[in-house]
Amino acid sequence: MKNIIVKTELLCKSFISDGEINNVIKNLDLDIFEGDFTVIMGSSGSGKSTLLYTLSGMDNVITGKVYFEGEDITRLKEKDIAGLRKNKLGFVFQGINLIPNLNVYENILSPTYKTNKERRKIESKIEELLERMDLSAHRKKFPNQMSGGQKQKAAICRALINEPKILFADEPTGALNSSQGQNVLDIFTDINREKQSVVMVTHDLKAALRGNRIIYLKDGRIDGDLRLEDYDKEAANEREETVYKFLKEKGW
Ligand SMILES: Nc1ncnc2c1ncn2[C@@H]1O[C@H](COP(=O)(O)OP(=O)(O)O)[C@@H](O)[C@H]1O
Ligand SMILES: [Mg+2]
């Protein structure tokens, strides 16, 4: 049995706009398992990004419960949630939001400020990440001097610098061309093989294939939950058929 890393109970999230209430997440009970590569899919506006924000404590204006490693994070003070986010959770956002006036190296380092991690350890971690993402030679570049793929890889390094327990990614390949996208997905597959838990929102079938679990969100509820073997490039065609069939049944 795998451990549960994130759990929700009767999670609800609503927005009010123009005096109208919009219930986006509705009484959601969800367990995310440690070591899994969980993919969240669903049509545009179905609440995928909203769910990711609530799962990761970025949005705590909710009802219901969210637990991280058994701890109820909806009861934490803002300062403690911020600490949890910084030390245990990693994020790669939709679009790439590197800090424009910091170079790659400084961008990746930025989440380590005000942590009590040893400088030497941080430096060796950043070297390992730069090497792995093929960014070593680009460390002094600013975001506007790099390609979309390089920027996304820098954003992934930044998300991983504090060695999070779980990595959340919202459409990480959305802004990339197909080969850049595959490159980024290969990185996700690799880090997941090293037991890193990943939760990724995507609307891209090729990206979804990387998961070992695909959750389909519809009108704020879970409408499908597909389990797969771990990703294997050799069996990708068969996998694509299975996932495509699942998605079509869900009205994707
Ligand atoms: N900050 C917000 N304020 C008001 N409504 C929002 C906000 N964020 C999302 N929504 C609404 O919530 C619904 C789901 O949005 P979102 O989670 O972004 O969907 P998805 O990522 O699946 O495309 C949409 O109807 C959207 O308009
Ligand atoms: Mg979204």
Image (tube, grey):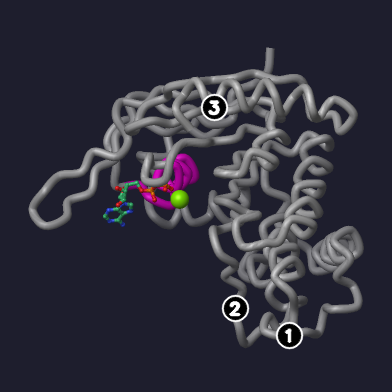
Q: Decide whether residue 53 is among the magenta residues.
A: yes
Residue 67 x, y percent position in the rendering? 46, 32
User: Image quadrant of residue 143?
Assistant: bottom right
Residue 99 x, y percent position in the rendering? 60, 78
**Disc 2 residue crowd, few under 14, some 14–19, many 20+, Cα 10 Å:** some
- Contact between marks 1 and 3 (CB within 8 A): the answer is no
Residue 78 x, y percent position in the rendering? 39, 55
Nearest to N terminus: mark 2 or mark 1: 2
Q: Which residue is mark 1?
A: 145
Mark 1, mark 3: which one is toward the viewer? 3
Looking at the rendered image, the quarter that the N terminus falls into is: top right
Q: Is residue 134 left or right of residue 178?
A: right
Q: Is residue 21 left or right of residue 192?
A: left
**Disc 1 residue crowd, few under 14, some 14–19, many 20+, Cα 10 Å:** few
Magenta stretch bounds: 48-60
Q: Which residue is mark 3?
A: 247
Residue at x 84% of width, y 78% of height: 138
Residue closest to the far top: 1
Of residues 237 and 220, the one nearer the viewer is: 237
185 shown above or below 251 = below
Instruction: Tell me the SS state at disc 3.
Output: helix
- Contact between marks 3 and 2 (CB within 8 A): the answer is no
Nearest to N terminus: mark 1 or mark 3: 1
Of residues 170 and 108, the one nearer the viewer is: 170
Q: CA distance from mark 2 to mark 1?
A: 13 Å
